[in-house]
Amino acid sequence: MKKLSDLLYKVSIEKLIGNVGSSIKNISFDSRKVEQDYIFFAIKGHDLDGHKYLSQAISKGASVIICEELPEELLDHITYIQVKNSSIALGIVASNFYNNPSDKLTLIGITGTNGKTTTTTLLYNLFTQLGFRCALLSTIENRISDTILKSNHTTPDPITINQLLAQAVENGCQYAFMEVSSHGIYQNRLAGLTFKIGAFTNITHDHLDYHQTFSNYIAAKKKFFDELPKTAIAVTNIDDKNGLIMLQNTNAKKVTYSLKSNSIYKGKIIESRLDGMLLQFRNQEFWTVLAGKFNAYNELLAYTIASELGFDPIVVVTAISKLQRVKGRFETYVSDEKKYIIVDYAHTPDALQNILEAINQSRTRNEKLITVFGCGGHRDKEKRPKMGNIATRLSDLTIITSDNPRDENPDEIINEIKVGIEPQNTNKYLTITDRKEAIQTAIKMAEPKDIILIAGKGHENFQEINGKYFPFDDMKIAKELIKNT
Ligand SMILES: CC(=O)N[C@H]1[C@@H](OP(=O)(O)OP(=O)(O)OC[C@H]2O[C@@H](n3ccc(=O)[nH]c3=O)[C@H](O)[C@@H]2O)O[C@H](CO)[C@@H](O)[C@@H]1O[C@H](C)C(=O)N[C@@H](C)C(=O)N[C@H](CCC(=O)O)C(=O)O
Ligand SMILES: Nc1ncnc2c1ncn2[C@@H]1O[C@H](COP(=O)(O)OP(=O)(O)OP(=O)(O)O)[C@@H](O)[C@H]1O
Ligand SMILES: N[C@H](CCC[C@H](N)C(=O)O)C(=O)O
Ligand SMILES: [Mg+2]
């Protein structure tokens, strides 16, 4: 049990009704999960308003309500705390409840449209290699040292974040690397956390279904940097045209990295191949098995962060040169017949363009490039025609198929993708709704040395159709089909 008064430390309270001397068993923002002696946070959400569930929370045992609007009828045995923003209060109380774990380790957050999972995973592997116990909060999985825990979000809710970080502290972790999504920033899932470094990868078209406009989306990302303390370091990619905006109003130390513009941490690609790259960071050259220009950015960001944390650049580069590819990110497999399979999580127009350009820059053009991809249902529809345009423009053949249709009709999604195809490319694509069949067709059509890119689902091991999750793993399926074709 924790003392309510201790949990309220740093929360700015507008009005308090009741006493703060009581003991609290746990905290929740979901009335369905409340038990005896819980604090319930009423949050105005995307679809529902948590203020509608006060009586359910109380009947399940909540003794304290933290809300933005007080109910008309107040009960004697309940403590009501009115705040300006319940989600910010939730973040602060969640940190207090778990003894402020982010103060006890070095927390690094990475935001941006693409590259968050790759960079946080590279950092986790890099710092583990340097001999530290580390934690990772990512889209693919959460890790506390060697223990792998399931991840349901890119950036989880504040209770889960603090629970994971507390576990990390208990486990002796010194560093934690986490992905910071724009949803997470906008919904104040990071309130109450102490970051040592906040870093920006890039910003391109995604999630406009949620943020409505591109400037809102930029503002959501920028908020992360605006809220960093003076003691933190704000790192940005200045090759991205919105990179400097992130640093405009931050109190943190400002650090830049780039492959093109002039910056503090300057990198260069000397040679680029499908099986790796020769890179130069500042004046040190090294070979990496990661492929694609975007991975040069991801490795450069990892290098920048490690250098800013005080590690010797030579030690860092040596460790970076040993890093392996991240699951579902430019993951490759070459069959006995020398058909080349690449599985990548490119699920935005920018990411698809980047991976296709990376492949095109590293091939001879004596072989065909076949792209298999679709777009997720119940997600930003503006991505669809753009991705149709890019795939057909940059591949010899495109097989448009389903991603995770969710509650949408997969054929309608495919039709929306087709809208973006330019007239000169209309003879360069097929549509096959069933993703496995689409992969099989690509494998059958490929000849030795041809390259098949399977994009959009990366590490995912399921396909979500109408609320059901069917087992589906692009790489596993491709390998099985290659064996049996
Ligand atoms: C649209 C969105 O982001 N929703 C997230 C948000 O839910 P919400 O607050 O809007 O929920 P709501 O349904 O409107 O309900 C409002 C409040 O009423 C409460 N409630 C509701 C019903 C009830 O009976 N009792 C009750 O108390 C809810 O617990 C909530 O506090 O806050 C929840 C807790 O943090 C999240 O789990 C939830 O994620 C949903 C499931 C989701 O799908 N989110 C995706 C889009 C997402 O967050 N993605 C990003 C980025 C992905 C990427 O590109 O990498 C991520 O970080 O994962
Ligand atoms: N730095 C980068 N710049 C541009 N594209 C990238 C970069 N890094 C990765 N990509 C592309 O974006 C895809 C997704 O990468 P990654 O999973 O690392 O991004 P993310 O930011 O975690 O995405 P999500 O928002 O889904 O969590 C990769 O499969 C690759 O095609
Ligand atoms: N985190 C992203 C991942 C999209 C992956 C793609 N396979 C899809 O299902 O649209 C999202 O939820 O929008
Ligand atoms: Mg991610």
Image: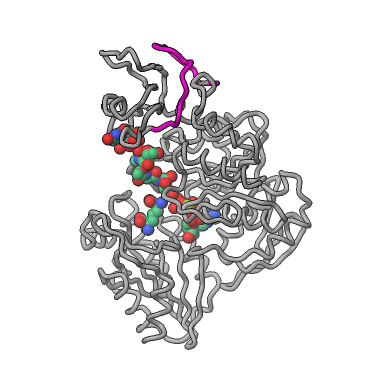
- Where does ligand 1 appear, by image quarter? top left
What are the residue bounds of the magenta stretch?
9-28
- Coloring applied to the structure: one colour
Residue 364 screen position, x and y as percent: 53, 79
Residue 482 or residue 10, whichever sits in front: 10
**Quadrant of the rendered structure where residue 259 is?**
bottom right
Residue 212 or residue 100, whichever sits in front: 100
> Does the magenta portion include 10?
yes
Left or right? Give the position of 269 relative to 118.
right
**Quadrant of the rendered structure where residue 476 is?**
bottom left
Residue 242 screen position, x and y as percent: 52, 41
Which residue is pictured at 41% across the width and 35% down the height? 216
Residue 200 screen position, x and y as percent: 56, 44
Q: Quadrant of the C terminus?
A: bottom left
Left or right? Give the position of 64 relative to 400.
right
Q: Is residue 182 visible?
A: yes
- Can you say whether 428 is above or below 105 in the image? below
Which residue is pictured at 71% across the width and 45% down the height? 264
- Can you say whether 117 is above or below 271 in the image? above
**Quadrant of the rendered structure where residue 243 is?**
top right
Report the number of numbered marks. 0
- Can you say whether 188 is above or below 425 in the image? above
Residue 253 screen position, x and y as percent: 67, 34
Q: Is residue 205 visible?
A: no
> Does the magenta portion include 88?
no
Which residue is pictured at 32% across the width and 79% down the height? 441
